Amino acid sequence: MTTFLKITLELLEGFGKTCEIFFVTLALALPLGLVIAFGSMCRLRPVRAVVRAIVWVVRGTPLMLQIIVVFYGPSLIFGVYGFDRELAAIVAFVINYACYFSEIYRGGIQSVPVGQREAGQVLGMSKTQIFFRVTFMQMIKRIVAPMSNEIITLVKDTSLVRVISVVEIIMVAETSMRKGLIWPLFYTGVFYLLFVGLLTLLFRYAEKKLEYIKI
């Protein structure tokens, strides 16, 4: 087996871990972000204040710090050991990105004219019906661009998990560097570019499909 093929297979294995963290984070953070957005808009001031404080702390501190705290915190604070490294990374990623997504959701929801929601109330629609039939689709169209930026950033942020020794693609490349090879580090860029390129095409397709919604 040639060196190139061997390193390619190793990078593919590391990239598989990158994709796993990405998709699990996305699947959990998207719905959680909507829940947090509702909390930040809650009419109950204490609830709104607590949720906004959490979002402020999460958005105001580095993701790398949050990963370290989630992994080492249980053992240092509560004496609980054996926390899975990958699980800790995913928990930190989900909390972090859910808070960022929540602000995008909130902006999208609040950008829908109040008059449209009031019109729904006049027609006798419930709050749930107004949200899903009036607000939701308009919100989706408004947030596609900012959401795509965050999701693409998530692809690259997955490399931060190596801070707690989760083996992802860049960590594999760094191992090759210790053997005197520099090209695997640049080779990882190809994987990221292809992945981000695919996501960019998907978001463009989504924007095109949503053109029929007038806002």
Image (cartoon, rainbow, N blue to C red):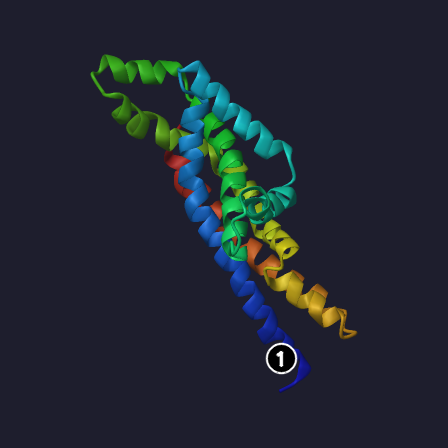
| Residue 196 placement (x, y as % from top left) | 57, 54
Tell me the quadrant of the picture where the C terminus can be found: top left
Q: Residue furthest right?
A: 180
Q: Is the residue 80 above or below the residue 100 in the image?
A: below
Q: Give the residue number, with chain letter if any, for mark 1.
A: 6
**With 120 as the anchor, is 71 left or right in this view?**
right
Q: Residue furthest front?
A: 79
Q: Considering only vertical position in the picture, is 1 above or below 101?
A: below
Q: Looking at the image, which is closer to me, 105 or 92?
A: 92
Left or right, 159 with respect to 138, comes to: right
Q: Secondary structure at mark 1?
A: helix
Amino acid at circle 1 = Lys
Q: Which of 16 and 75 lies nearest the eye of the viewer?
A: 75
Residue 205 in sight here: no
Which image quarter holds the N terminus? Answer: bottom right
Is the residue marked by circle 1 packed among few (<14), some (14-19), or many (20+) residues within 10 Å? few
